[in-house]
Amino acid sequence: MGNLMSVFYVVRTSLLGYYANAERVGGRLWRREAISQENHVVLELTGESDASTFTLKALHTPGALGSAEGSLVSTSSRRWEMNGAIELFAGMDGLDCFVQTEEGNNIGPIRLSGLELRAKSLQLEHAYKRDLAMEDSQRQLMMFWDIVETLDDTEALATSAADEGVARMQSFQQSGNTEYLVQGLSMLRRAAQLTPEDNTRLPGRLSNLGIALMFQFGYTGKLSDIAEAIHRQQRAVDLTPSGHADLPGRLSNLGNSLRHRFERTGDLSDILKAVSAQESAVDLTPDNLGASLRSLYHRTGEISSISKAISVQERALELTPEGHPNLPIQLTNLGNALASRFQRTGELSDIVEAISVQKRAVDLTPQGHPDLPERLSNLGVSFTFRFERTGDLKDITDSISAQRGAIDLMPDGHDDLARQLNNLGSSIMCRFEHTGDLLDITEAISTQQRALTLTPEDDVDLPSQLSNLGISFECRFERTGNLSDIAEAISSQQRALKLTPHDHPNFPRMLDGLGNSFMRRFERTDERSDIDEAISVQRSAVELTPEDHVDLPRRLSNLGNSFACRFESTGDLSDIGEAISAQRRAVEITLKDHSDLSGHLTNLATSLALRFERAGALSDIEEAISLRKHVLELTPDWHTDLPRRLTNLGNSLTSRFGQTKAREDVEEAISAQQRAIDLTPRGHGDLLGLYTNLAFTYSSLYTTFAQAGDLAKAIESYKAAATTTVGSLIGRLQAARNWAQILHRHHHQSPELLIAYDTAVGLIALMAGLDQTVRGRYARLQTASGLAIEAAAVACSCGRLDKAVEWLEQGRCVVWNQLQSLRTPLDDLRPHNDELAQRIAEVSQRLEHAGSSREKSNFTMPLSEKISLEDQGRAHLDLANEWNDLLKDARSIPGFEAFLLPLPYAAIRRNLPNPGRCDVIVLQNGLEHPLHIPLPSFSLEKANSLKSGGLRDRGEETTGISDADTGKGHEAPVHHVLRSLWVEVLGILRMNSASEGLPPRIWWCPTGPLSFLPLHASGIYGVAEPQSVPDYIVSSYTPTITALTDRVRHISPPEAGKSGNGLFLTNQPSPPDAPSIPGTTTEVQSIYGRANEVGVKVLKIEGSELTLDGCLQNMANFSCVHLACHGSQNASEPLESRFLFHKGALSLGTIIKSNIKNADLAFLSACQTSAGEEKLADEAVHLAAGMLAAGYRRVVGTMWSIGDRPAQQVAINFYEHLFTRELGAGDTILDGAMSAYALHKAVEQLRNGYDDSEHSLLAWIPFVHFGH
């Protein structure tokens, strides 16, 4: 959807009228008087100067008083001294000094500046020196002197300091030289210090000192400077009598300082005080009041404030004659006020007039004037505002040019540089929105980031700068699809909100922008919390926006977009109703010549089209088409949204074609969609959607008219969409699947068929990447459910069994495979690059933790918690990116090209252990190629039918009595399922009775609905001569072949005396909020006793004696663990599946994070520990698979609920067989290698005590073995 976002620009006002009341005092300014009569002027030969035949007589200082011709006395052959003093009076610009020799020759002169002398005296520094000019190059003569103040005329000194301080500040204003600022401030501070409290000149001197401090604040940004300025100026006002002629000026200056502190801190009380002070001085300085009123408006949003500001500034302009030096200031301030009102009302005449007066202000400002950069920048911002209103590209070009010129004129360290950079970045971003030039958005972000680095944390502009930067990141995300950009966008805007008071007029704008970013991320990730948050904050933005605000239509339209997005995900008709209502209102209140109108119309049309797809009302799609055609009439050829608007029209025409079958609709749709593609640059994030839309249209056309050319175009377009390198991974995967399915249906011999499925399966793991939480990965994998099985079936039909195996491995159990890759041993890599291996190990641990630990956000959370979660999300994303970079580095090492890539069939086969359509693929150690066994009478439909046969219902304990309720002539459901599996699936395996010794062993790796069916128990029961799988073989399961081959490759037998070998047992018979299972106590005590008898290292901790941490510690200390307790599966959050203890719940995620090193065997004597989740049939989301992922080589679990008594019997007999088979005479090493055989024997003993009734079968069928 063509979502529009608002951008806020900060406009800086000029420094106004700081010297409206500068004090001027005549009379003698400086008087010098010696404090002592010794050695105040010294002349000395320096360096290697020749002292022979060289004698000095006197020092001449024409024009000075006192010792105008001082006698010099030789104190050595190289040194002469003059006693006495030289007085310098106010009218003197400086002092010329000549040194006379005995021969009457003058040496020098040396020129001492009066300004320099006075500055130094005020700073109370002494012992100054300077070289004299000498014609004789053989000699170097230096003069030393002290400067002292006379102490008999303090008022004269204070007056001198005040006058000289003002002169220095005027020099600073004209030149920008900060040395004058330092000197002027020092003199003015000295003048105030020397002035008694009862002196009538003190208020003026305090006021001037405050003004100088304000200037210093402008350069240092230190709040202490402006605080002192306000303090000094407030004292000046307090000391000034009511009715005094200077009171208005001092009030105005105080107001200026208060206003500038407000602009830095945002403290509302400051700007209110500023307005109050300046209203008292309005007759003298209306322009200053206008500036403060404008600042008040920006804080409160009260339109009366900005209207009053314009009124007083128009009056100030009327009072300013042509040629007056303040005229550019008045013009600038009026222009800024008009631009501010335009932002509120959208009245075009305001921004036109603003640009006119700001242009005039710039024209009247001479080159080199310190205010020129600011005036250029303000003009540039106004051009941007008009561009947003009219869409005239010349305005945005002029805007950027003016702002670049302003920044070029600013020295590094200028107080205003950060604001100007922020404004320039926002203007460049605006141009990007209309032209799509990627260089623009890159420069905009870089410029705004530079602005942020220059902005103090306590600056009032910081929130707006953060918000604008966030909007720019969002714009780049729309173009490139880089998730890091949208994460930065959300983080920046959340920080901006946190720093902004809720009653600030910018608060709704920031809420709206943040909502847009959440909506954009939802479109990419489908994370429900994002769209809920988007709607929540955008609804608040609309509620906080006044009815007459120019941005209300934009915020309504954006809110509608988010409702429409949620509707696409949930199908809730109330959402699309809300969307259309909000967007209709947005259109109705938008000015007809406003550049936003086309965007609002587009959004409304999109929502109408979505409702048509769901409800089918032809009027909706008719209106949508009409609106889209009108939008295209309003869209210039250069506009960056033109391709989207063309494809949207095509989509709506295709939708109407689906109902009316009017060929002209679909032909017009194809024309519009093809033009959209032609106008879109390569690498653009929109290409995926554009190609997908065109493919769908061609597919619809082929379905209706069956023209081969249309089918070829559909295939070509789906292929182009699937192979784009940017855009939503979910969208690319769906396009690849459509490409593959169309080829399979219509061109099943095509050489591209396997390429298409290879593309689709390869995108599964990318779509559910490590940058997401485990919860998020499982949610996204639901969209790819069944794809790997579908692809494998096609590979089988093409005779490519190797591909079938590879795709089943690659596209199933994705999350567990990722966890295994994060735990891959790095022993082979370390000799080649130990540092790289260590970094991979560190990042893998952090990624594993990040994927399982982050809390899910919801819109009721405090903002601080949301920001924290976003920070965690960004860190997680950074880790995932670093992980990918590390893998690239590893794969660049010879011999590691396939490091952690999906294994090819040859590698899978190498580590096998020694023992639509439906197929069996058999892999056996020693066979180079897999064995393919088709199942012609079995189908996916039959598998689903068997799955729904009730086997997962809770089994009841039985005493061996036959099921009396089963009527004759009707096969019981359980019998039917097991018979069907035997006859239609496993009968083809030609099983033979086991010979003496161990029976053969099979590892089942079922897919799809077969994952929920007990292949290990298939058979014909309840007949005279029953037969079943357990009669012939020992069964184990594995989630994937790789999970099995990894254990074979890394297996090592337990060693005698090795720490960690042994058995840890616990029973938890009465956990809170769960039924009691008292049999677990007998079970564990019996196993414990038998283990002690045979000498196995064993530990038993029962019930409340065991803490969660204690359990984890003992699991690390013992190679085998037996958990007799309740189990609870969480399909949506598999790592939250847990074992219920008396003292809490031990989650699977906690076990996995413990990274147990010596894990061998886990016996889970709990219910439903290997029950999967139907929506994620290929992901093995159960406790048994999770324990394999935690590192255990083999796991005993249950497919569904089990009875207390059967559980005891199987567990006790299991260990009896394991101990008997594994432990020889005197051997105490416990090895789970024979655990599958031990379970087989234990279940066989249980079966022998039961008949073949359904209840009896359900008592033993649930027990299953996983792993090696």
Image (cartoon, grey):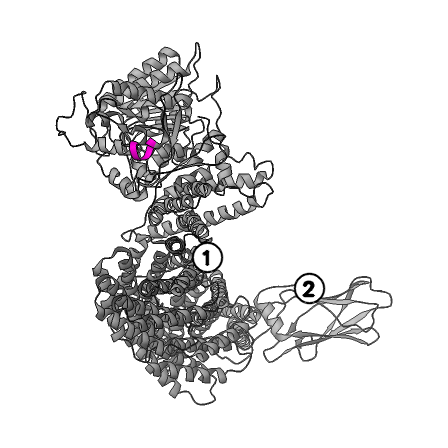
Judge whether 1059 appears above or below 36 on screen: above
Query: Is residue 983 within the magenta segment?
Result: yes
Q: Secondary structure at mark 2?
A: loop
Q: Is residue 71 left or right of residue 24?
A: right
Query: Quick check: can you spot residue 132?
Result: yes
Judge whether 1129 appears above or below 992 on screen: below
- Amino acid carrying mark 2 in the image: Glu
Q: Nearer the viewer, residue 19 or 962?
A: 962
- Amino acid carrying mark 1 in the image: Thr
Instruction: Please identify the residue farthest to the right as the structure is shown.
Output: 53
Instruction: Please identify the residue farthest to the top as the structure is shown.
Output: 1225
Residue indicated by mark 1? 723
Point out the stretch of residues depicted in magenta.
982-987
Split into 4 quadrants, where in the image is the N terminus?
bottom left
Query: Is residue 155 within the magenta segment?
Result: no
Judge whether 715 appears above or below 247 on screen: above
Query: Quick check: can you spot residue 159?
Result: no
The percent position of residue 576, horizontal first and vertical second, equals 24, 63
User: Residue 38's mark?
Assistant: 2
Split into 4 quadrants, where in the image is the C terminus?
top left
Q: Which SS does the magenta portion mostly show?
A: helix
